Amino acid sequence: MMGTRNALSWLFAEEFARSFRRKVSAGVVAVALAGTLAASTTTSSLADEGGVSFWVPGFISSLAATPQVPGFSFANIVYYSNVSAGGDVAFARQVPLGNIKVNFNGNFNANIHGNAEPLNLAIPGYVFATPVLGGQAAVILGIPYGRIQSSIDATVTGNLGLGPGFSIGRSLTEAVTGFGDLVPQASLRWNFGVNNFMTYLTGNLTTGRYDQSRIANLGIGHNAIDAGGAYTYFDQKTGREFSATLGFTYNFENEHTQYQNGIDMHLDWGASQFLSKQLQVGIVGYWYNQLSCDSGAGDRVGCFESRVVGIGPQIGYVIPLGKEWQGYLNVKGYKEFAAEHRPDGWNAWLTFAITPAAPGEAPPSANRRMVTK
């Protein structure tokens, strides 16, 4: 009996490690994209497989729908994140693991921690001068790169129906450096005085570093399509603006793990005041909510829908770079709360962008949109 129990305990520990890698795959880190670009890299939302959602909450804030100046642009985002979670992030109620053929009734205590060290995002883009459907068309490409680290400290206690209960501990730390999934995006913008509207379509190319056996990944291991729209109220006379972006993500099945994330909804917003033609201050926030259950043969946690809310400050500054170009520097941060079935914590974003200046004007100009974060 003792030998059988030891063998099953060893099997349980190995299956636990493999299952945990699938469920928390780099889950405690997020990467951001500037403008109206969704990020296809690791984030912290569970119910999405391995804590990884396509959309990164918080990457859009102010001036999301205002027009841009035609021509080429380039931005780079430096992203810092620190999040953690408990046992519910791994398993909801009971823990059916791998080849264990009997019910496991026990307790699961886990501390999950992750951080970006930092993650970067390069974003080349182009805005077309010729109108499309009466609006302004633009395309961008997100190229995530950098290093992330994830760690697990977990203990499982329970009874496999073999007599007295047992306790198994498992600690693991992994890091990965490289590139994430490429993220192309197309958008259209329309301007009607102080009212501005935008629609976008984006997805990911599974080119990032991904290994289902790791807990730290820069790719998400599956394709996704995200579509939505934004509204911006911007009064150039008073310098006040408010923006909100609503979108939905459809996730395809991860063929490596036979796991399919549910449909996700995300609302990002920002409000700011231009104190001068160059200086901007305000607040930012987001609401992320999974609308449908996860599924697939590899789903070991059931429905397990996730949600989180974040809010924080922002400050931006327009930097003159001559008559043809201008720079923009923005810093913003979020503190998360009301999280359910996902890690939460804080994240900070540092964005620097170079864009064309308005024709015939020396930047900065109060008569043109500054830069979308």
Image (cartoon, grey):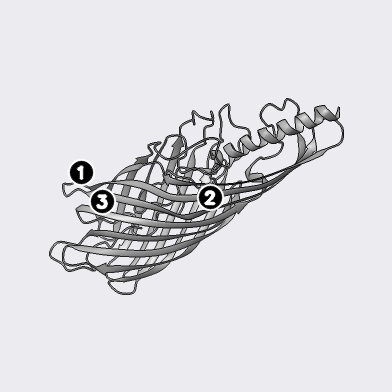
Q: Secondary structure at mark 2?
A: strand
Estimate the spatial distance between the alpha carbons at disc 1 and disc 2, rounded to whole Å: 43 Å
Indicate which label's residue lies in the foreground, 2 or 3. 2
Of 67 and 83, nearer the camera is 83
**Position of the C terminus by quadrant:** bottom left
Of 227 and 173, nearer the camera is 173
Q: Which residue is mark 1?
A: 132
What percent of the width, then of the height, locates residue 283?
44, 65
Residue 248's tag is none
Q: Give the residue at x 36% y 60%.
A: 351
Above or below, comparing residue 138 to residue 80 in the picture: above
Q: Which residue is mark 2?
A: 149
Estimate the spatial distance between the alpha carbons at disc 2 and disc 3, rounded to whole Å: 41 Å
Above or below, comparing residue 256 to residue 125 in the picture: above
Indicate which label's residue lies in the foreground, 1 or 2. 2
Q: Give the residue at x 69% y 32%.
A: 96
Left or right of 282, for residue 73:
left
Q: Amino acid at mark 3?
A: Trp
Q: Residues within 10 Å of mark 3 (few under 14, many from 20)?
A: many
Q: Earlier in the sequence, mark 2 or mark 3?
A: 2
Q: Amino acid at mark 1?
A: Val
Estimate the spatial distance between the alpha carbons at disc 1 and disc 3, rounded to whole Å: 10 Å
